[in-house]
Image (cartoon, rainbow, N blue to C red):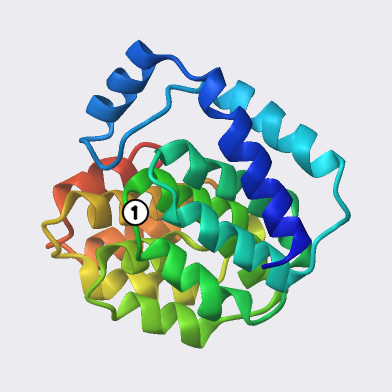
């Protein structure tokens, strides 16, 4: 166990619970469909604590980050996974080319719900697939039986604007157009809505070519189309 991991885990487990609120914890747990127990710590408060802890430590290596975040994923309360995403967001430039396949795939597919999966998308998947093109890995995730890996693959280009690989986006959406699952349909809809900001015509074409697209996805995709 690295000194970095030791210190982060020690301080978080000592200090984070004291910042919680029982009533808020119960509300959060109910809102998140009982995916995990909560401490009831507000997001700005948690992020301030993580920032304070990290400010006193040397910049970690990719391996140290992976070791620490995996340890946070094993802790019971959900705020520890959120703290893991805070850590990843701060140090995503330190992550190496192997992190997506060796660690992020594990994180996405364990203790999975939209909160951690989408957090990982913003903190790790999107920036790392920009830095290290990972088309083969995104295609692998897209074919997975794990809906959260599929969701992550579909959403991995969100926010890229004119750097969006439209052909790849459509390739990843197309196999799932008839999926009845809410979380996949939302992912497709949001990805298409993002694309419509820069290329309405391509989104409209995709919709016309896929009349069986889940209505949830269509509704999201059409929010910005003309």
Image check: 55 left or right of 201? right
Which residue was labeled with disc 1?
187
Expressed as whole percent of the image width and height from the top left, the position of residue 137 reads 48, 83
Q: Image quarter for residue 23?
A: top left
Q: Residue at x 79, y 68 (%)?
A: 61
Q: Nearer the viewer, residue 176 or 73?
A: 73
Q: Residue at x 55, y 26 (%)?
A: 43
The answer to whether residue 126 is visible is no
Expressed as whole percent of the image width and height from the top left, the position of residue 174 reads 28, 72
Q: Residue at x 62, y 48 (%)?
A: 9
Q: Nearer the viewer, residue 153 or 204?
A: 153
Quarter of the image with the C terminus is top left
Image: 219 above or below 124: above
Q: As drawn, which residue projects farthest toward the bottom?
A: 136
Q: Residue at x 36, y 37 (%)?
A: 223
Image check: 195 left or right of 132? left
Image: 133 above or below 129: below
Q: Nearer the viewer, residue 145 or 32?
A: 32
Q: Nearer the viewer, residue 143 or 57?
A: 57
Image check: 70 left or right of 222? right
Expressed as whole percent of the image width and height from the top left, the position of residue 213 reads 18, 59
Quarter of the image with the N terminus is bottom right
Image: 53 above or below 62: above
The image shows a total of numbered marks equal to 1
Q: Image quarter for residue 131?
A: bottom right
Q: Residues within 10 Å of mark 1 (few under 14, many from 20)?
A: many
Q: Image quarter for residue 24?
A: top left
The answer to whether residue 14 is visible is yes
Q: Secondary structure at mark 1?
A: helix
């Amino acid at each position: 166990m690295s000194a970095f991991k030791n210190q982060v885990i020690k301080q978080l487990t000592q200090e984070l619970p004291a910042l919680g609120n029982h009533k808020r914890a119960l509300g959060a747990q109910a809102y998140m469909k009982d995916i995990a127990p909560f401490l009831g710590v507000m997001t700005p408060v948690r992020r301030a604590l993580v920032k304070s802890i990290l400010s006193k430590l040397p910049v970690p290596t990719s391996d140290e980050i992976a070791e620490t975040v995996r340890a946070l994923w094993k802790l019971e309360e959900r705020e520890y996974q959120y703290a893991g995403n805070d850590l990843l967001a701060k140090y995503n430039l330190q992550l190496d080319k192997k992190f997506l396949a060796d660690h992020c795939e594990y994180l996405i597919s364990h203790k999975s719900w939209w909160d951690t999966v989408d957090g990982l998308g913003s903190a790790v998947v999107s920036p790392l697939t920009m830095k290290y093109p990972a088309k083969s890995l995104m295609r692998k995730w897209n074919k997975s039986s794990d809906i959260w890996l599929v969701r992550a693959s579909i959403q991995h280009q969100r926010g890229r604007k004119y750097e969006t690989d439209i052909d790849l986006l459509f390739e990843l959406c197309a196999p799932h157009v008839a999926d009845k699952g809410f979380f996949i349909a939302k992912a497709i809809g949001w990805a298409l809505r993002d694309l419509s900001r820069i290329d309405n015509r391509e989104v409209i074409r995709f919709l016309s070519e896929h009349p069986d697209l889940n209505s949830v996805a269509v509704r999201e995709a059409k929010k910005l189309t003309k």
